[in-house]
Amino acid sequence: MTGWSEGARQLLGYASSQVVGQPVARLLADEVAGRAWREAAGRESFGRTVVLRHRDGHRVELRLLAHRLPPHGTLAEWLVVSAVAGGSRASEGEAATPGGEALAEWVFRQSPCVLAVFDADLRLVRANAGMEAVWGLGEEEVRGLRLAEIAPGVVSEEAQARMRLVLEGGGTQQVQAGVRPAGVGAERGWPALLAPLEDAAGRVRAVCMVAPPVLPGHIGAQRMLLLNDADARIGTTADVARTTQELAEVAVPGLADFAAVDLLDRAPGEVTPGGPAGPFTLGRTAVRLIQDDGAVSLPPAGEVFGCPDVSPVAECLAQGQGAVYGVGDAVIARWAAKDPQAAWIRRTGTHSVMVVPMRAGGTALGVALFGRHRRPDPFGTDDLWLAEQLVARAAVSIYGADRPGRQHTTTMTLQRSLLPQTLPEQQALDVATRYLSAGSRAGVGGDWFDVIPLSGMRVALVVGDVVGHGIRASATMGRVRTAVRTLADVDLPPDELLTHLDDLVIHLSAEEGGPDGAASAGGVGTTCLYAVYDPISCHLTLARAGHPPPAVVAPNGAVHFLDVPPGPPLGLGGLPFENFETELPAGSLITLYTDGLLEARDHDIDEALDKMFQALARPATALDAVCDRILTSMLTHRPDDDIALLVARTRALHGDRFATWDLPFDLAVVSRARRHASDQLTAWHLDDAAFITELVVSELVTNALRYGRPPVQLRLIHAGHTLITEVFDSSSTAPHMRRARTFDEGGRGLLLVGQLAQRWGTRHAATGKTVWAEQFVTVPGS
């Protein structure tokens, strides 16, 4: 076993560390279960009822669904999922027609359309024969599972997100690729409609997925001839402009009535599913149009233009996959109305548009646009597949000809891989981020940001800038960012963390010293800002090393900079860093950024700060809108230096979600501490967690009284599905776990805590320390 989820732990009682790396046979209750599993393992996906053994020894009969995942190297893996609670609710989604129940069932089962019903938890309750044929799995094999578990991939994840919108009152939703048939790539699928199913009171209780009958899997002879023609005609030279024109000439009139190819103006980096953030520039390199007469003018090739965020082109580049649009779609209407580059839609009377990204070697090169205005039939899924094949042939040729941009691409790929791919879950802050790469010839820099959950529901925010550009700067950024995360796990105060980070940069400089001077600086001159926010006290503690101070927007709209002592850049050594503490009421905005945001070539720093203040002073509910407003108001072109931007809105933990007790310095108080904890859990309706919590409280309080110094304080924090126990005392001695011998009378306390809690640790303050432990709890009604 190579992975183990929290749901699997609740189901069978094993922690991840107890099963990962162990053979699957350890979980099988008998040989019959193992034989049934092996007999079905030759399929790509299969469902089986298997008897497993719980950690405490009792047998658990489960319906499992397994998917064979694409192999990594020589190792093939299986994703195994189970719907423990889904099957029992199947009847909730079964609608009956009064007086015609049998007919309604026949219609549902035999409908030529693809039909499926998902309940309010997004679990499958019904699927007709068409949907079974699409998935290659029977309804009984997948009932109770979510769509992303039945057909893993980005197509299913996007459809699930739209389902949630339907359940939340968003009405009927249309997804371009909602159903992914068996044998189709994980990023492609057929169009589907998601409709709400309401009860008699008008409440949405389920979602119905409807798709047209699946088209034949083969491509007609005419399309095969077009692909063969493309092999001979696309990529005949190393000239990029010629290759794009060849793509347009093959596509028109063979596939479309209009075609245009737009390449990114500068060599791009890796485009992740989250997409490139902020403005970027395209250059039109080829265009071709079928005209009935000479009245329609062609959009000119050779122009360089910006790409609006509202355009399908930006959406295509952000998601890394093609899409088909009708001219009545809202995104097309907004694009055609606001972007001069989309004027051809109105001029030609185009009724169907297709947008396909150009990618090769994991790199985004640009985008190809296709339109139909003469042919009455709109583009379909098979047309999108064919366009992707044509564009892929051109992209491979362009990528091979673009050797000068390859190193830049490699650097950006490295940089993007070292930045956070997703933001961690936490309850202290709402966070939005943006990252814009430099447009200068100096290359990619070493800016970075991070969001790090800490103990006690606190969260650390980090923004930094490594000196220099290129692969060396990106690699150094990765090492410095890793060091920050490691030091954050130790729960150091911001000033101490920067002191340790300063020592690290000095060591890196010594290791990389050489004749090339600045190129071997090893990060000397790196700037960093490290901030810790506590949602219980609403306190923000931060320190900075040569980095610009953050801007704060109070709930009343007032904007100001925090007067954080500057501190020297990292790698100089010998100079101190100072903490700055302030209180931020719930709803405050804190903005962290790198200096590239202030160094635009067409205005000075004071003007840049004024523009930032004006952007922040304008109210906005969505943090993404705040980020975009800052960038669009301060940038008129691609920046000369990398920009990292992080905007966070503070939350405050309500007073009824934590409780604190000051304890007398007497061992007799341990029983009273347990009673405090038990009473509080009863108030929170968490009585199921009382046994473990009392043991943890007893051990931590006893240790503080035996080995610490007064005062001693106990605190419980209820954070959703996590219960946090904290014990403070004024001693600086850190506890450590040891294994007691057979006849030892003590030494088992922390070992017991480590077994009962999900994680535990110690954090030090200027005076004293806090020992904490976190455990998972089941919240009633969740």
Image (cartoon, rainbow, N blue to C red):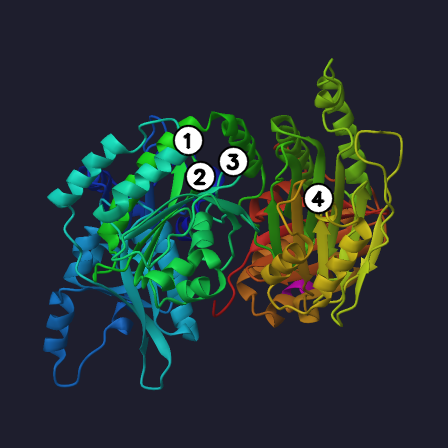
Is residue 599 placed above or below 589 in the rendered structure? above
Mark 3 → mark 2, Cα distance in angstroms: 7 Å
Circle 3 packing at 10 Å, graded few (<14), some (14-19), many (20+), is some
Is residue 350 placed above or below 9 in the rendered structure? below
Mark 4 → mark 2, Cα distance in angstroms: 25 Å
Residue behind mark 2: 365
* Contact check, label 4 and label 2, Cβ < 8 Å: no
State the mark number for residue 267.
3
* Contact check, label 4 and label 1, Cβ < 8 Å: no
Residue behind mark 1: 399
- Residue 132 visible in the picture: yes
Circle 2 packing at 10 Å, graded few (<14), some (14-19), many (20+), is many
Amino acid residing under circle 2: Leu
Q: Nearer the viewer, residue 241 or 359?
A: 241
In primary-sequence order, the first of circles 4 and 3 is 3
Mark 1 → mark 3, Cα distance in angstroms: 10 Å
Between marks 4 and 2 in the image, the one whose residue lies nearer the viewer: 2
In primary-sequence order, the first of circles 4 and 1 is 1
**Quadrant (top left, top right, bottom left, bottom right) of the N terminus:** top left
Secondary structure of the residue carrying tag 1 is helix
Residue behind mark 4: 596
Q: In percent of the image, x 83 and y 54: which residue is there?
A: 581
Q: In percent of the image, x 52 and y 37: which residue is there?
A: 269
Secondary structure of the residue carrying tag 2 is strand
State the mark number for residue 515.
none
What secondary structure is the stretch in magenta mostly built from? helix
* Extent of the magenta region: 673-678
Secondary structure of the residue carrying tag 4 is helix
- Residue 418's x, y, as percent? 57, 36
In primary-sequence order, the first of circles 1 and 2 is 2
* Contact check, label 1 and label 2, Cβ < 8 Å: yes
